[in-house]
């Protein structure tokens, strides 16, 4: 009688879920998937994996899905010692099988997932869709799947369901600054792993700034041997007066072979890497190595202070040759179609007092130095386009009148720049400080570690709508997607970075995956603890500010 009553209650819950679109706690806990699927229909029962379970792989015209399977099998083997077989669809058994089939009607990053009691069927048009389906299965498995050692007492079951899923936005990214504080290859890979779990598809690698140059350029070795290290770093806050420095040499850089290794690692997880080489501002580390490409000639030291500095790249021809040489090596390394050239926070005082720059302005008939920056951006864009790539820049590239016809704009100073760019027909990635800066505080607790300022709690991240209502339907098609930025002035270690990124990255993933009308923070809050439990198993140092918010809401 009790079993019948429980079954009846579950059917009622399912009916409410399917007809109203509102998830209830029971379903949110059992199907704790982040980002939430576009459509999920729960079913009774579970699929149980065991050492006889087989993967049956179909042929995909857009690549081989075997890599997506192997990553899943490898982690399962780490916790079970099972080495599951992969066979062709023709060899698939009738039961105890996970089948991957090509279905060209499914969107490029989407998937259909049917979990039955005897088999799981994945349909996708691309291997990436298969990979995302497996990440969904991963989140439906017990959290112990994330462990590093054997878990002999765990029952490896997946609740039955039907899912049809695909992302809202094409670009779903996280920016990580390794210039202010260097991150090792293993640390970078740890972050990439977490992007993959949450179906984020772009890692924006901020490789150069005033405080460090982090990528080997073979033609200019001083960029790393000199620009990759600094002799002091600010202690405490930038606002503290008098300022104190630690007087300790610190730094590091990635060889081109290491960069290739990270690119492959990301590609195996269906993540593109967007490299950023800052210009014309934020250039002190480069100018410390090669001062002849400044307006004044230097000398310079790699900065240990945060902020904006007056010395920037000069606009003389030799500088452009230098930057084109650098970009040629970067473009040869990175397969992604986009190259980020910065363009933000460029003071013009040196240009105002530089004979070369003033002569350039006179030659081109430019009215002011902001137009000179537009010339700079356009000239670099022409070179990047000649190499088959597309330029991305921060929204300051609009300030002098955007003359780079193909450039993609990252709108960080609010949404104004992104709206203006979309109206001009430029593609846009939204990344405003007020919603998506992960270097801002996420809690108002006095115990929070030092941050740069601002306040962006997880619920505010979740509330963001990347497509402004003020855009027309045609203009809105230029919103490629969304990105959160992690600037590392106050994040000198991996645990500090993790604390600032996690779990806000989970909210970011759902912002990029679902339309604003589909999102429900209360439902997200019920699913999030399951992800945090996975972070516990992984040893991720996430913030507990989410729980503080819940306590306030409950009046505690």
Image (cartoon, rainbow, N blue to C red):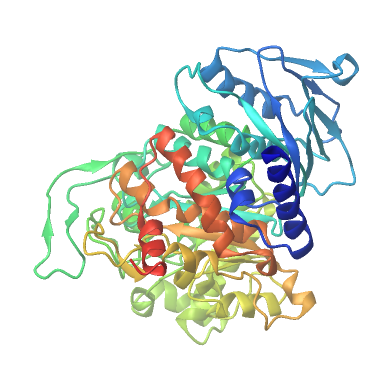
Q: Which quarter of the figure has residue 5? A: top right
Residue 221 % position (x, y): 38, 38
20 left or right of 326 in image: right
72 left or right of 372 in image: right
The answer to whether one can see residue 246 in this image is yes
User: Eyeballing the image, is 498 above or below 96?
Assistant: below
Q: Which quarter of the figure has residue 19? A: bottom right
Q: Residue at x 64, y 41 (%)?
A: 335
The answer to whether one can see residue 38 in this image is no
Residue 447 % position (x, y): 22, 59
- Which quarter of the rendering shows the N terminus? top right
240 left or right of 274 in image: left
User: Eyeballing the image, is 88 above or below 497?
Assistant: above
Q: Residue at x 75, y 69 (%)?
A: 477
Q: Name the foreground residue: 177 vs 433.
A: 433
Q: Name the foreground residue: 513 vs 556.
A: 556
270 left or right of 153 in image: right
Residue found at the very far bottom of the displayed protein = 367
Residue found at the very far left of the displayed protein = 242
- Which quarter of the rendering shows the C terminus? bottom left
Q: Name the foreground residue: 128 vs 40.
A: 40
Residue 153 % position (x, y): 50, 19
User: Eyeballing the image, is 325 above or below 445?
Assistant: above
Q: Residue at x 56, y 69 (%)?
A: 464
């Amino acid at each position: 009688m009790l079993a019948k009553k429980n079954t009846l209650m579950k059917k009622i819950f399912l009916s409410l879920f399917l007809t109203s679109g509102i998830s209830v706690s029971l379903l949110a806990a059992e199907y704790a998937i982040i980002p939430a699927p576009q459509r999920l229909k729960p079913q009774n029962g579970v699929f149980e994996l065991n050492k006889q379970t087989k993967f049956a792989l179909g042929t995909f015209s857009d690549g081989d899905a075997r890599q997506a399977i192997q990553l899943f099998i490898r982690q399962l083997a780490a916790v079970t010692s099972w080495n599951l077989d992969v066979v062709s669809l023709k060899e698939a058994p009738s039961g105890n099988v996970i089948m991957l089939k090509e279905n060209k009607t499914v969107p490029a990053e989407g998937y259909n997932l049917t979990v039955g009691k005897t088999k799981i069927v994945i349909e996708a048009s691309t291997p990436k869709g298969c990979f995302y389906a497996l990440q969904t299965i991963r989140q439906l498995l017990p959290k112990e799947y994330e462990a590093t050692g054997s878990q002999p007492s765990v029952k490896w079951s997946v609740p039955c369901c039907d899912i049809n899923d695909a992302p809202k936005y094409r670009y779903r990214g996280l920016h990580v600054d390794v210039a202010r504080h260097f991150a090792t290859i293993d640390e970078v890979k740890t972050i990439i792993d977490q992007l993959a779990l949450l179906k984020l598809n772009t890692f924006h690698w901020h490789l150069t700034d005033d405080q460090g140059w982090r990528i080997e350029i073979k033609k200019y070795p001083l960029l790393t041997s000199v620009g990759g290290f600094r002799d002091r770093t600010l202690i405490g806050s930038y606002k503290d007066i008098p300022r104190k420095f630690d007087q300790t040499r610190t730094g590091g850089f990635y060889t081109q072979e290491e960069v290739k290794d990270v690119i492959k690692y990301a590609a195996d997880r269906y993540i593109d890497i967007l490299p950023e080489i800052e210009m014309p501002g934020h250039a002190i580390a480069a100018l410390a190595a090669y001062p002849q490409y400044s307006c004044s000639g230097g000398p310079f030291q790699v900065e240990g202070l945060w902020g904006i500095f007056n010395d920037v790249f000069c606009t003389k021809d030799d500088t452009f040759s230098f930057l084109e040489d650098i970009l040629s090596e970067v473009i040869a390394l990175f397969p992604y179609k986009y190259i980020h050239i910065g363009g933000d926070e460029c003071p013009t005082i040196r240009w105002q007092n530089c004979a070369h720059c003033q002569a350039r302005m006179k030659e081109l008939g430019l009215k002011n130095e902001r137009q000179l920056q537009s010339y700079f951006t356009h000239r670099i864009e022409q070179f990047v386009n000649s190499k088959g790539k597309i330029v991305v820049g921060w929204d300051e590239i609009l300030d002098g009148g955007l003359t780079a016809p193909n450039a993609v704009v990252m709108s960080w100073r609010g949404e104004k720049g992104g709206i203006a760019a979309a109206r001009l027909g430029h593609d846009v990635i939204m990344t405003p400080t007020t919603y998506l800066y992960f270097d801002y505080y996420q809690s108002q607790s006095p115990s929070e570690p030092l941050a740069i300022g601002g306040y962006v709690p997880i619920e505010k991240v979740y509330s963001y709508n990347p497509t402004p209502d003020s855009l027309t339907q045609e203009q809105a098609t230029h919103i490629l997607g969304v990105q959160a930025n992690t600037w590392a002035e106050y994040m000198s270690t991996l645990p500090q970075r993790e604390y600032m990124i996690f779990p806000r990255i989970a909210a970011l993933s759902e912002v990029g995956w679902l339309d604003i009308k589909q999102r429900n923070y209360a439902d997200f809050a019920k699913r999030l603890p399951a992800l945090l439990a996975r972070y516990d198993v992984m040893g991720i140092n996430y913030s507990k500010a989410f729980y503080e918010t819940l306590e306030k809401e409950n009046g505690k």
